[in-house]
C-alpha cells in the first residue's frame, strides 16, 4: 500500500530546504548591508576636522566662511 503522506512529507522537506537557503541568503545580505552602512558612517569621521580655527581678523590665512558665526546680518543693518 502506498504511503498517503509521502508527497506531503516530500513537499515539506523541499519547502524547509528552500526556506533555509532563503534565510541563509537573507542573513548574508543583511551582514553585507550592515558592513556597508558601517563603512559609510565611518567615512564621514575620516574627513571630520577635529580642530576648527576661529578667524581673528583679516589676514591671508583666514578663509571665506570662518567668520560666519560672529556676523549677524540682522543686527548689522
Image: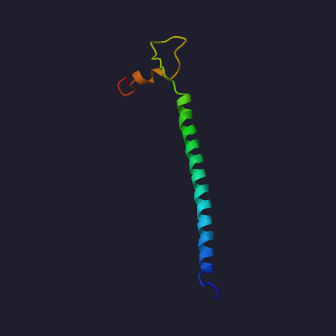
Q: Nearer the viewer, residue 2 or 32?
A: 2
In percent of width and height, residue 62 lies at 52, 15
Q: Nearer the viewer, residue 17 or 71?
A: 17
Residue beneath the point at 60% across and 85% down: 4
Residue beneath the point at 57% across and 38% down: 39
Q: Is residue 26 left or right of residue 68?
A: right
Residue beneath the point at 62% across and 65% down: 18
> Which quarter of the image is occupied by the N terminus?
bottom right
The image quadrant of residue 21 is bottom right
Q: Nearer the viewer, residue 60 or 31?
A: 31
Q: Is residue 49 left or right of residue 1?
A: left
In percent of width and height, residue 27 lies at 57, 53
In percent of width and height, residue 67 lies at 45, 20
Q: Residue furthest bottom?
A: 1
Scheme by which the image is coloured? rainbow
Residue beneath the point at 54% across and 33% down: 44
Q: Residue furthest front?
A: 1
Image height check: is 18 above or below 40?
A: below
**So how many labels did they put on this image?**
0
Image height check: is 22 above or below 45?
A: below
The image quadrant of residue 38 is top right
In percent of width and height, residue 35 lies at 57, 42
The image quadrant of residue 6 is bottom right
Q: Residue furthest left?
A: 75
Q: Nearer the viewer, residue 42 or 5?
A: 5
> Which quarter of the image is occupied by the C terminus?
top left
Amino acid at each position: 500500500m502506498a504511503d498517503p503522506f509521502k508527497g506531503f512529507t516530500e513537499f515539506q522537506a523541499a519547502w524547509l530546504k528552500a526556506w533555509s537557503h532563503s534565510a541563509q541568503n537573507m542573513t548574508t545580505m543583511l551582514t553585507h548591508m550592515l558592513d556597508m552602512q558601517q563603512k559609510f558612517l565611518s567615512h564621514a569621521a575620516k574627513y571630520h576636522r577635529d580642530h576648527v580655527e576661529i578667524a581673528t581678523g583679516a589676514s591671508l590665512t583666514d578663509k571665506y566662511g570662518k567668520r560666519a558665526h560672529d556676523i549677524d546680518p540682522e543686527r548689522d543693518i
